[in-house]
Amino acid sequence: MPRISILLGLAAASCLALSSPALYAQAAQISASAQSQRDGAASAVRRDFAQFVQYQVQNHAGSAPQGFPLEVADVQDLKDARISYGFPVYTIDPTDLLAGRREMKAMTRPTGIWRFVITLHDQPIGLATVEQVNGKWETVAYGASVMAKDLDAAMGAYANAERSNVRVLRIYQAQSDFLEVSSAQNGAVRFAPLHSARQSLLLQRKGAGDGLLDASDLLEPLRVAVKKNLDNTR
């Protein structure tokens, strides 16, 4: 029996030794892919925003026209606007949400969309949305000044210096956005409902403690909203 135990232990150790390089290589590949996405999206948004600013400044003088996508009093102010930090957008498939067989964290998946906060004198004035179009990163929209302010405030309240403990989650069929916050102590996930979620789901941050909501606070309102919106589109 001791000999068998020793042999089994050696076999297990051998398997781990063989699998570890593969696991490390896979993790490195995922990390490199994420970094490549980040770099590609960031490069595109800075290029496109420079062109956007040049066009707007050359073609508009004085007050921003009605419906202007960024919150500026004067279009010429755009010359001082900057692209700040960016983040990938995550979502949950509506069928997974309605089935509810897993935790929200496990159901979350990347959309492939990146958004970047645009600031003027360090104050958020809107978001730039970046996607891959025919294999190339392009800025496809500007706007969402309310979300930009709300999100930036939530980032300031809950994100660490690298923003590695937070993710932006958008449930499209519920028209709701959240900041997902992971605990540094145990990795537990909780949520800050952003403006759209507070409006669509009538959610409020908790008055006591850190103000974050548990997944159990969100699931039923989300399922009701998703089911209603899906039924309306059929």
Image (spheres, helix red, strand yellow):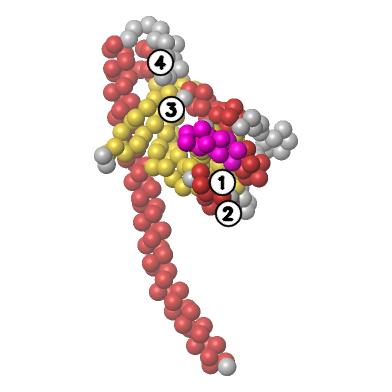
Residue 101 is marked as 2
Determine whether 100 is above or below 76 in the image.
below
Q: Position of residue 228 (x, y in %)?
A: 56, 35
Which sits in the foreground, 149 or 83? 149
Check residue 224 for magenta coloring. yes
Is residue 98 at least partly visible in the picture? yes
Task: Tell which tag, 2 or 4, sits nearer the viewer.
Answer: 2
Q: Position of residue 37 (x, y in %)?
A: 35, 44
Determine whether 67 is above or below 31 in the image.
above
Q: Which residue has dot 4 on it?
A: 68
Task: Tell which tag, 2 or 3, sits nearer the viewer.
Answer: 2
Q: Position of residue 166 (x, y in %)?
A: 53, 42
At mark 4, the secondary structure is loop
Label 2 CA crowd tier, 10 Å (few <14, some 14–19, many 20+): few
Q: Amino acid at mark 3?
A: Leu
At mark 2, the secondary structure is loop
Q: Amino acid at mark 2?
A: Arg
